[in-house]
Amino acid sequence: MERHKVPRTKELEFGGPLGALLLLILLPTTVFYLLLVCRTEQASLLSLPLPLPTLHSLWNPQDLALVLGWMGLQAVLYMLPTGKLMEGIPLRDKSRLQYRINGFHAMWLTALAVGAGLAAGLRLSYMYDHFLQLAFSAFLVAFGLSVLLYLKALLAPESKLALGGNSGNPIYDFFMGRELNPRIGTFDLKFFCELRPGLLGWALINTAMLVKETELRGSPSLAMILVNAFQLLYVVDALWHEEAILTTMDIVHDGFGFMLAFGDLAWVPFLYSLQAHFLVTHPQKLSLPITAGIIILNGLGYFIFRGANSQKNTFRRNPADPKVAGLQTIPTATGRRLLVSGWWGFVRHPNYLGDLIMALAWSLPCGLAHILPYFYILYFTGLLIHREARDERQCLKKYGLAWQEYCRRVPYRIFPYLY
Ligand code: NDP
């Protein structure tokens, strides 16, 4: 095999080309189905047939321009020479890419721009009124971007391809993503999409839902405030710790194709905001004890999530850091060690556990009468179980016997004594 040439992908995920094709259809359908259900009075997943919008009513050039304008604004903020430059982890050819870490600045500048717009009379509730059209536009952008990424990857040298997106089957590779770190000059398309337009878009949509609720009922409800505050904390946290994304599976392992482009640009902003969306038309009253309980639950989830992620990131960056130096570890043949006490000795994915506890706290303000606002935690449990299994396979390959030893000493994957 020629040096840096990427081998054909043999182990196919998501059921191979057929699974990828089904997901290409299923993911957009799911978003639309849930958004349509959310806008019905019963908000019941079984209330079929749904009043289906026509394609003509979904297509609105102004909304497409808004989505593109939003992405353009985020791209300009991404290119500002603020923040620090960080290196990603070494690539297969041992080179390292540089990334500009200025997401937190972008968030503040976006908040200022939105605040100024609101003060000048911007009607943010337009987003609620045109939600389906905006979602449709985001689909088109994600699909268009995926096509461009696929074509770009055809011209890229083999050394730039992701190991998982080179099966030779165009549907599978289009879905999984062929190129690992597609860039235009220094503009990293995957890194940009992972945390900027979609994540900030999610916070913007939540705000728009709060504004809409205020227009309808005079003031935002406690439930809406909780959902907004919890999810804003999550977004702010992700941007504050932006550099942590450089070691995630998405950046290190997965190519940039439809799966990530659609996830980042359409799925996250339009579905993760489902609880706030639901509350606009299905108001909930929360008692103070219940509110306190939900806040404590979110705090507990955040404590575990942040504690676990920070502990691993600190350890990976500098194992001699006094915050982690006292933890027990297992040596591996690669020279890297695995934590086996602290959060990572509790379960093998404590960060997923914390994330799922928060997910529950985001749904509870929507009451117990509907399953729809619980979609996020149900889907997220599935996603993290699947992600955990993928990660375990990769860690077993990477660390072999040391990983087996880790699994023996820390037997539970995500939920202590359960799984
Ligand atoms: P993780 O942060 O869980 O990283 C997994 C990697 O950590 C492994 O590949 C291994 O890499 C390292 N690792 C595993 N065990 C140990 C150990 N005992 N000691 C030291 N290192 C270890 O990856 P994710 O990208 O899946 O998750 C990051 C965060 O993002 C999580 O909090 C997750 O919940 C969240 N997330 C949120 C999503 C959302 O949609 N809201 C979607 C996906 C993730 P190595 O050894 O090479 O360092």
Image: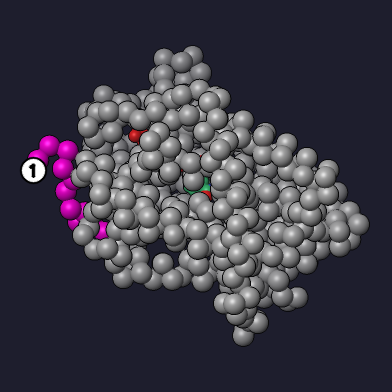
Q: Nearer the viewer, residue 117 or 337?
A: 117
Is there any visible trace of residue 412 in the rendered image? no
Helix, strand or loop for the magenta stretch, by majority: loop
Q: Check the image and tell me how it is coloured.
A: one colour
Residue wearing tag 1? 1
Expressed as whole percent of the image width and height from the top left, the position of residue 357 reads 60, 47
Residue 301 falls in which quadrant of the image?
top right
Tag 1 secondary structure: loop
Residue at image coords 73%, 69%:
369
Residue 348 falls in which quadrant of the image?
top left
Expressed as whole percent of the image width and height from the top left, the position of residue 405 reads 29, 36
Number of numbered markers: 1
Q: Which residues are magenta?
A: 1-13
Residue at image coords 46%, 24%:
85
Residue at image coords 35%, 43%:
182
Going by the numbered disc 1, the residue's amino acid type is Met
Vertical relation: 44 (above or below) 103: below
Expressed as whole percent of the image width and height from the top left, the position of residue 265 reads 52, 53
Residue farthest to the right, as pictured = 218
Vertical relation: 227 (above or below) 83: below
Expressed as whole percent of the image width and height from the top left, the position of residue 55 reads 57, 77
In reply to whether residue 10 is colored magenta, the answer given is yes
Q: Is residue 120 left or right of residue 39?
A: right
Ligand 1 falls in quadrant: top left
Classify mark 1: residues with Cα within 10 Å, few (<14), some (14-19) or many (20+).
few
In reply to whether residue 249 is colored magenta, the answer given is no
Q: Quadrant of the N terminus?
A: top left
